Image: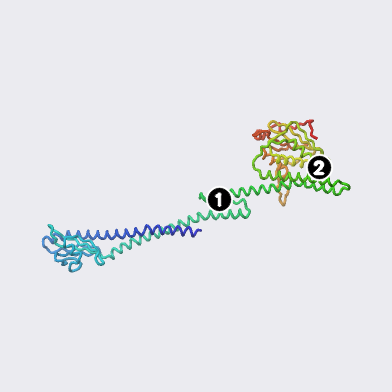
Amino acid sequence: MRRRIVGVATLAAVLAIGLFGVPLAATVAKYLLDDERGELEQVADVAAVSSSIALARGEPPTPMPDTERGTDLGLYDTSGDRISGNGPRTADEPTRRALAGHQVSDEHADEIVVALPISANGTVLGVIRATTPFSEVYQRIGEAWLAMLGLGVIAVLLVWLVARALAARLIRPLQQLAAAARALGDGDFSARAAPAGIREIDSVGSALNTTATRLDDLLARERVFSTDASHQLRTPLTGLRLGLEVALDTPGQDLRAAIGTAIEDTERLQTTIEDLLELARTATRSTELVDVLPLLTELRLAWLRRPDTARRPLRINATTSPATARASTAALRQVLTVLLDNAALHGAGTVTVTVRDAGEALAIDVADEGPGITTAPAQLFTRRTPSPHAPRANGHGIGLALARSLTEAAGGRLRLSTLTPPTFTVLLPTAPGAGPQFARGTKRAKELTQSDSVIE
């Protein structure tokens, strides 16, 4: 491409110089020819003035004035004989025409001839004949053309150099753009095209960068989905497998009932997958109005079917009815599932879920009777990034980080309200635009209320 750009620019320069130079060269040649003829006429005028007095008096002619090399002057009488200077001995055709009283300026043989009659009172006394060979004119024209050719070569050379510089400036960002596109094709979604300062190329680079950003975001979403899905499905799959193994190993077990329970567990797994897919593909905040109590009832039934929580009660206390919040049903289901799984795995005793009014927010407290949490809250909600040397050094895990991100995406907050007994509080907006008002934190968000209203 570099050669094509330089070649096209140089060819255009040559054509432009040729189209302009050829007429200019012809004009210069004509100008120099006319200029030479004019100089001859001046020389002839000077010689005529100096010779006219002697001819009028009948005196011998004066010598011809000095001229440039190659220019000849001759004085002819009325009979056509040369009486002074240089030239043919007898009058030639231009000289005879001048003896007839006409000023002659013509090309004759290989010379430029100017014949100027010398007159007195209307009578021709003689003729001044001035000549210069065409070789002198050709030399001047050649010198002018050679100078023009040199300037043309210099101009073409400058165009070639400028074209090379411009081609390099154009090709460098294109090469960088191609390298970024290749890196993007190889899976490096962090590749970006640097700005080139050329609007058209920058437009392509911006489009490529936008595509790379979208692909990187899509890949990040897919990775997060894979991680979150594996985390959220691990516990239900373990419970499903344990339930089936217990049914097979227990004599007299009603396998039909076990299969029915397994089908219900499978439906819940499918719901979890659909929730995670919806959350991974949805970038906007949900504004649907969710009734929290039916959702908690659904989670309580799932809790009772789990083999690892069969002997641990789950109490749901509601201090407000209806308990509605603006959030995504899928997101809220996953947030509460994470908190209940966390209580089942790390906590002890009865798990209590309290739903209460927190002003412009709906608060959901999840508490258990465990010994308490010793992990720092900042690290507790940090998503774990496994490494070969410290697989659990950069955060507590995935579940709580997922729960907090889903809560914040819905415009709410998730916090550790109490270390002992461990209590997590979910704050959700109850009306559009309420999120920023309670997100700055209030003292009421720390209050844990109890009620005798229990859903069993």
Quadrant in the picture for residue 303: top right
**Numbered circles on residues, count:** 2
Please indicate, yes or no, whether residue 107 appears anywhere in the rendered image.
yes
* Residue assigned mark 2: 305
> In the visual, does 381 lie left or right of 214?
right
Give how far across and how far down residue 421 sits, in percent: 78, 36
The amino acid on which the numbered mark 2 sits, given as a three-letter code, is Arg
> Is residue 396 something that shows in the picture?
no
Helix, strand, or loop for circle 1? helix
Q: Residues within 10 Å of mark 2 (few under 14, many from 20)?
A: some
Residue at the extreme left: 57
The residue drawn where x is 76% and y is 39% is 298
Residue 69 at x, y percent in the picture: 25, 64
**Local crowd at mark 1 within 10 Å, few (<14), some, or many (≥20)?**
many
Q: Residue 296: give x, y in percent of width and height.
A: 76, 37
Residue 205: which numbered mark, if any? 1
Front-most of residues 90 and 151: 90
Q: Residue furthest right?
A: 251
Query: Which residue lies most toward the front here?
Result: 256
Residue 322 in which image quadrant = top right
Please say if the residues under marks 2 and 1 sit with CB atoms less than 8 Å apart: no
Could you tell which of marks 2 and 1 lies nearer the N-terminus? Answer: 1
Separation of marks 2 and 1 at Cα, in angstroms:
55 Å
